[in-house]
Image (cartoon, grey):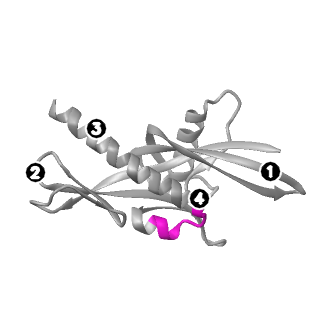
Amino acid sequence: MRAYSAGGVVFRLAPMRAPGTNFAIDHNELNKEVSGVGEMVSMEVVLVGRSHAGIWALPKGTPQPGETIEQVAVREAQEETGLQVRLIAYIGSISFSFVRDQIRYHKQVRHFLLEAVGGDTSLHDHEYDQAEWFPIHEACRRLTYQNEVHILYQAEEMLLRWLQHQRKEDQR
């Protein structure tokens, strides 16, 4: 049986003070000089977790009738994290199989880059008992599923390109 769902990488940019530092990226943290004043930002992402199972994951879920895949990603991210999010772009998809009640499911999850624009992680729904912010390198270490780590790396690269584009737009 085939199943589809959507979710994403919910990010925020946390300020870091580093005057005179040029734009740089390393895969431990995303750093970007912005607004020409030497202010640096670090990418943080929200993971959702189940403490009893020791699982950390990206928010995702199943479509409701009539929803577009983008609407699913936004709704599920908001429900599972407690945050209000804005869709930025499509990142990519992952596929995997699992068995439940003696039925093999082939699942595809489409992930989107989502910017946190409000809300609070304490307002997450009951599906997970934890929703927490992590620096990108820590989130990669904590994620339970390797295919989600790959999505997170893709999100980091996409965010870098998006920030560069935003900076060019701001300079016009």
Q: Which of the labelled discs sits on residue 129, or is there none?
A: none
Q: What is the C-alpha distance between the residues marked 2 and 4?
A: 37 Å
Dot 4 alpha-carbon crowd within 10 angstroms: few under 14, some 14 to 19, many 20 or more: few
Which residue is label 4 attached to?
147
Q: What is the C-alpha distance between the residues marked 2 and 3?
A: 18 Å
Q: Position of residue 49 (x, y in %)?
A: 58, 64
In the displayed structure image, the side of residue 6 where residue 25 appears, left or right: left
Residue type for callout 1: Tyr
Mark 3 / mark 1, whichever is N-terminal: 1
Please tell me whether mark 1 or mark 4 is closer to you in this view: 4
Q: Are marks 2 and 1 in contact (CB under 8 Å)?
A: no
Please tell me whether mark 2 or mark 3 is closer to you in this view: 3
**Quarter of the rendering occupied by the C terminus:** top left
Mark 1 / mark 4, whichever is N-terminal: 1
Q: Is residue 8 magenta?
A: no
Q: Which of the labelled discs sits on residue 105, or is there none?
A: 1
Which residue is label 3 attached to?
165
Q: What is the C-alpha distance between the residues marked 3 and 1?
A: 39 Å
Which residue is label 2 attached to?
37
